[in-house]
Image: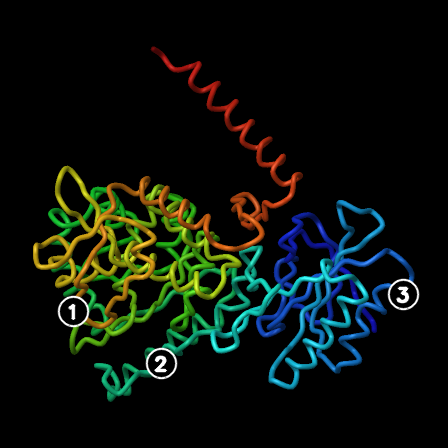
């Protein structure tokens, strides 16, 4: 019953974005910033109550009487009603019995607060689908990526029996070392420098040497523009595997995107959420040298050669972020559609350039066979239509049989935004680059704020145009 209060400037409520007073039982502090512990909650409940003595005690009683573990509580005044307060409660729901008790507590809470004042935010697994009136949990501030960064589907050192490095103990130990670095990483820290072995550098050298010979004829102009800059500023060459920290700083200067190391494969929802904050989750290990031109999972060659050059391009970076923002709070079935859209664009995208096909997808640009296939007549090409792309099945371990051709990044971004407007969620999201946070736009006050910001930018643009010479 002893709560300690802290001031914070982010909220979890889709209906309000303002400063809040945070009351918490289980927190970590880093650089004077409030961050919840990574395993603190599976389900969050947002509710509003009258500002009366013992109101909070009454509202929390259903959780206490149903023996539920509350791990985190936040409160703030309700902007539209000064006589009410809004609360966020995080709870651990670890088994079916706890789930039944949770549902009973929610029913009781809705009687106390009225049903329309209670909302459930959840990070349920696909086998425990989101129920009616629940919104999938999503991060509001960039620091909250720490919450799911280690909730990976496979750990980096876990290899299948058909993996080229399965029987190589040295390689497995290296993979675990890289995975441990990522597992212990927290937002705001510099990415640790690693020393790659001679064998790893040799593998990298073979790949970058052969691929770089194809870029001039097969890669899009945005990629070709950035590639020499990476060679000059980040030591992209056959004798050196660039460090993620150095590359991250360069990408941030170019487009605002940053890199975050990851220990293994994230779920589609979590990976896309990172893009919303202009964060790219990147592996740091390298494929096994026995087969340098094949990898069953993303590695540092795929990330640095395939992804990074285009993330340096502001137009492409904005397109990538658009897919990420669309995923926040989206239902599971829409996450699958957006992940498929990501696959056929960010991973295996092809565009037209001066009447010729060029690759912009990382899966194409980091694979010799895929790069040659995507611009040849051997594969099928279809027009860029998000509604069709989102339901198209694709192979993961073989060459792609079909590609969707975008006329330009700008047009692709427009179509993705138009398609995303169909996602059934009761709010629109907007990324604030100054606070590195997501703002929910579903109230008049939020809309007016955006209008004021846009008006200010338009005045700046008007002033700039007036000073241009005819």
Query: Which residue, as the protein is rendered here, is positioned at the far left?
Result: 377
- Between discs 3 and 2, the one toward the N terminus: 3
Compare residues 59 and 313 and report the one nearer the observer: 59
Quadrant of the rendering where the N terminus is positioned: bottom right
Judging from the image, what secondary structure is the residue with disc 2 in?
loop
Can residue 222 be seen here? The reply is: yes
Residue 281's quadrant in the figure? bottom left
Residue labelled with disc 3: 54
Residue labelled with disc 1: 293
Figure check: 448 above or below 369: above
Query: Is 227 situated left or right of 118 in this image?
Result: left
Q: Nearer the viewer, mark 3 or mark 1?
A: 3
Residue labelled with disc 2: 157
Instruction: Identify the residue shown where x is 75% and y is 46%.
Output: 79
Q: Position of residue 162 (x, y in %)?
A: 23, 85
Query: Is 23 situated left or right of 314 in this image?
Result: right
Quadrant of the rendering where the C terminus is positioned: top left
Instruction: Identify the residue shown where x is 19% and y is 43%.
Output: 352
Distance, label 3 to label 1, CA atoms, is 65 Å
- Between discs 2 and 1, the one toward the N terminus: 2
Instruction: Identify the residue shown where x is 41% and y is 68%.
Output: 262
Query: Which residue, as the protein is rendered here, is positioned at the far top?
Result: 470
Instruction: For label 3, count other residues whose C-alpha is less than 10 Å away and answer few (under 14), some (14-19) or many (20+).
Output: few
Figure check: 240 above or below 312: below
Distance, label 2 to label 1, CA atoms, is 20 Å
């Amino acid at each position: 019953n002893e709560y300690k209060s802290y001031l914070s400037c982010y909220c979890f409520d889709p209906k309000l974005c303002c400063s809040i007073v945070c009351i918490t039982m289980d927190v970590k502090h880093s650089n004077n910033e409030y961050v919840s512990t990574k395993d603190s909650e599976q389900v969050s409940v947002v509710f509003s109550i009258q500002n009366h003595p013992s109101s909070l005690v009454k509202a929390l009683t259903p959780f206490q009487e149903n023996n539920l573990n509350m791990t985190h509580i936040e409160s703030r005044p309700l902007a539209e009603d000064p006589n009410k307060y809004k609360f966020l409660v995080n709870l651990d729901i670890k088994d079916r019995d706890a789930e039944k008790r949770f549902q009973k507590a929610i029913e009781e809470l809705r009687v106390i607060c009225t049903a329309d004042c209670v909302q459930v935010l959840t990070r349920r697994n696909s086998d425990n689908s989101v129920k009616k009136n629940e919104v999938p949990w999503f991060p509001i501030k960039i620091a909250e990526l720490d919450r799911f960064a280690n909730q990976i589907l496979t750990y980096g050192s876990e290899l299948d029996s058909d993996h080229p490095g399965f029987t190589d103990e040295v390689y497995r130990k290296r993979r675990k070392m890289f995975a441990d670095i990522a597992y212990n990483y927290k937002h705001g820290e510099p990415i640790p420098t690693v020393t790659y072995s001679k064998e790893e550098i040799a593998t990298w050298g073979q790949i970058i040497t052969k691929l770089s010979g194809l870029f001039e004829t097969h890669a899009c102009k945005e990629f070709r523009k950035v590639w020499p800059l990476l060679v000059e500023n980040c030591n992209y060459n056959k004798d050196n595997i660039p460090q993620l920290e150095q590359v991250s700083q360069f990408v941030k200067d170019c487009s605002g995107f940053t890199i975050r190391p990851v220990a293994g494969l994230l779920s589609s929802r979590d990976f896309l959420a990172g893009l919303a904050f202009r964060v790219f989750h990147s592996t740091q290990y390298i494929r096994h040298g026995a087969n340098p031109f094949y990898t069953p999972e993303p590695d540092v060659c795929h990330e640095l050669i395939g992804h990074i050059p285009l993330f340096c391009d502001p137009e492409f970076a904005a397109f990538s972020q658009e897919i990420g923002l669309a995923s926040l709070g989206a239902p599971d079935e829409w996450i699958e559609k957006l992940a498929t859209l990501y696959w056929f664009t960010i991973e295996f995208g092809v565009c037209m350039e001066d009447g010729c096909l060029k690759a912009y997808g990382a899966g194409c640009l980091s694979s010799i066979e895929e790069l040659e296939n995507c611009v040849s007549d051997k594969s099928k090409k279809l027009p860029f239509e998000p509604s069709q792309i989102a339901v198209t099945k694709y192979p993961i371990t073989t060459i792609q049989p079909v590609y969707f051709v975008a006329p330009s990044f700008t047009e692709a971004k427009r179509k993705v935004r138009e398609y995303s407007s169909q996602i059934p969620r009761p709010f629109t999201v907007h990324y604030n680059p100054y606070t590195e946070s997501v703002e929910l736009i579903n109230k008049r006050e939020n809309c007016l704020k955006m209008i004021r910001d846009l008006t200010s930018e338009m005045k700046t643009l008007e002033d700039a145009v007036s000073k241009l010479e005819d």
